[in-house]
Image: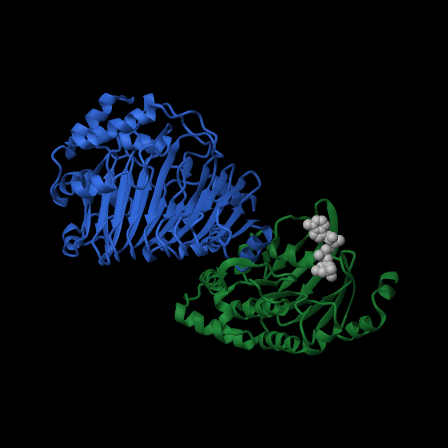
Amino acid sequence: MLKIKNLQVKVEDKTILKGLSLDIKPGEVHAIMGPNGSGKSTLGYVLSGREGYEVSGGSATLNGDNLLELDADERAKKGLFLAFQYPVEIPGVSNMEFLKASVDTVRDYQGKEALSTVDFMKLAREKCKAVNLDPNFLKRGVNEGFSGGEKKRSEIMQMMLLEPSLCILDETDSGLDIDALQVVADGVNACRDENRAFIIVTHYQRLLDYIVPDKVHVLSDGKIIKSGGKELALELEEKGYSWIEKA
Amino acid sequence: MSDVIDSYVKTEYQAGFVTDVESETIAPGLSEEVIRFISAKKNEPQWLLDWRLNAFRLWQEMDEPDWAKLDYPKINLDEISFYSAPKSMDDAPKSLDEVDPELIETYNKLGIPLHEQAVLAGVAVDVVFDSVSIVTTFKEKLAEAGVIFCPISEAVHQYPDLVKKYLGSVVPQKDNYFATLNCAVFSDGSFVYIPKGVRCPMELSTYFRINEANTGQFERTLIVADEGSHVSYLEGCTAPMRDENQLHAAVVELVCMDDAEIKYSTVQNWYPGDENGVGGIYNFVTKRGVCHQNAKISWTQVETGSAITWKYPSVILRGDNSIGEFYSVALTRNYQQADTGTKMIHLGKNTKSTIISKGISAGKSSNAYRGLVRMSPRADGARNFTQCDSLLIGDQCSAHTFPYIESKHPNAIIEHEATTSKVSDDQLFLCLQRGIGAEKAVSMIVNGFCKEVFKELPMEFAVEAGKLLEVSLEGSVG
Ligand SMILES: Nc1ncnc2c1ncn2[C@@H]1O[C@H](COP(=O)(O)OP(=O)(O)OP(=O)(O)O)[C@@H](O)[C@H]1O
Ligand SMILES: [Mg+2]
């Protein structure tokens, strides 16, 4: 589904990703761990088409499409979803309005019938409940005044609404209390199916107890320096990163 | 992001066509003769001619003000024609059927159908084309409620006592350079009178259009809401795209008697000039209302047009417990300049005012809020709340805030909040990542920023105003 080959990315003339390769098949969950500043968020941004990230080499395809030449909104419409590490506020734009616009464009692109406002609201309320958010959040501005944990749950709610095929979750577990972590994990698990893949960026092995990954990768200084099964996460928790980085 | 900013710069103006009607337009320049001509054209009584001539004499002693944060060459009044009217108006049409079809078509194109059956349900319209009013709809229906809604040139003849009593009562003749000029040469505009205790049964609306080249438009609107009455009024404005700058200097006076309420909304979309700053309307407008006891005046404006906007809709809170409100959205793009705001003059006890101003600047434009809150020594228990927010799109535009506070009462409460923000790359990217295109994203963010003001507009016009911001972006993201 997602094939990344030898990807090299520069930000403001500084090389951040230095030849990263990754192959993700439908239905798989890949966890990416690694020290601060190693390039995890950069990977999410460059895959989703954020401006300011210059690809200086390599390739990335999603379901056969060359991702790197598509506009950011095209990539989203093709089913790529990024849950942000730091969700931004858009004052005055209600979640309802924002999500309706989002769902409408994505559905339209995928040739699905438009949802009536009533059906949309029903669906949105349902997804709010699934992540334990009061449906009144739909009336509030996008992330406006949300607590850290509420922002993260709202990202998962959006993911559930859009039913993407590739979900990249950038530290969605950071700043969550134990109950919220469970809620987020349940949300992700409920979305798992054979056609959908996940990249889960995290610093904590704990999340992977709830969302059991097929593979775990260690990203360090712009490269994947080790890959393994879910045991790798446990090992990292115990020993830190230095033992691999030195190896 | 830069593409989206460009789109703000490369906007198409949708109302920029010219109507081909034969017009009678007098030679450019201003003199006593011109004033006598205008007055004669309208068959005015002697008192009004004298009033105009008096204003002209006052005006000759005045200088164009230069305190605003606006930069433009001195306006050459010798190049402006002060009167223009479609020829077909010579024998004024008695009904819509007699109105020149070219004119009806003009308004259809602008989305303002004049046939009553097609008109927005519940809105009566007075239509002013260059210097004359063409038609007023729903006159009979309004008359049943005792409401007078007609061109001011007609009111002068039919309701001379009302006009004589209130004309110039809120904005004195010698108020300021542009208002005084208007007194001398005003062409047409709307007159509204709502009798005691009457709630006007429909929205009233005036639609102004400048068509002729090299003409100025100097309309004058007078609204009198008698005791305990209520009216909601809306004005809209457009003009063709032309390379020369055209002057628009209007005066609006509101008289709000005890317990009455006037809600005055403006959607100003005069031609703003092209992307190089060529052409566009110079919009110098004086709008003021006076509130008697327990009365309320609410100004709501959405200003997206004009090369230059100089405008400060104000409220004199004369009566105790009266309320003044000002809600404003001003959008400037390309080389547009806006210096706009309000004055709240608290004279009575327990008077309250609210000011919410949202300035959006893009391109190389300049957007300034200028507001005065004055608390008089007898304004016991008066309070004001002001909130001024600026939103910048791109990094070549500017936003300025000039709040003036004069409090002569120790207990008066004045609160002022101001913020400046940018449409951030983060916000834009969040929208894109959710599949929402760049144009839609920017207009959504801008609309969100304006929400507090849009909710004050009558329903139909809130939708209209939202669309206006969207239209600005249409089809231009590269
Ligand atoms: N716009 C930018 N300008 C300059 N440097 C940048 C920019 N964006 C990212 N970087 C740098 O790229 C490197 C990788 O950043 P990135 O955010 O991808 O790290 P991360 O692995 O997600 O870290 P964390 O675990 O702290 O979230 C960092 O050194 C960061 O400072
Ligand atoms: Mg990160």
Place of residue B413 in the rendered image (x, y in percent of width and height, measured from the top left) = 50, 54
The one of B88 and B478 positioned closer to us in this rendering: B88
User: Is B28 placed left or right of A123 in the picture?
Assistant: left
Place of residue B396 in the rendered image (x, y in percent of width and height, measured from the top left) = 56, 38
User: Is A26 placed left or right of B452 in the picture?
Assistant: right
Chain that appears green: A
Q: Is residue B66 visible?
A: yes
Place of residue A55 in the rendered image (x, y in percent of width and height, measured from the top left) = 67, 49
User: Is B193 placed left or right of A4 in the picture?
Assistant: left
The one of B474 and B37 positioned closer to us in this rendering: B37
Residue at 26% over, 34% down: B130
Chain that appears blue: B
The total number of labels drawn is: 0
Query: Based on the displayed image, in which of its 4 quarters is residue A159 positioned?
Result: bottom right
Place of residue B358 in the rendered image (x, y in percent of width and height, measured from the top left) = 47, 49
Q: Note whether B305 is above or below B352 in the view shown.
A: above
Q: Note whether B21 is above or below A38 in the view shown.
A: above
Task: State ligand 2's quadrant.
Answer: bottom right
The one of B114 and B317 positioned closer to us in this rendering: B317
State the scheme by which the image is colored.
by chain
Q: Can residue A8 be seen in this view?
A: no
Residue at 40% over, 71% down: A118
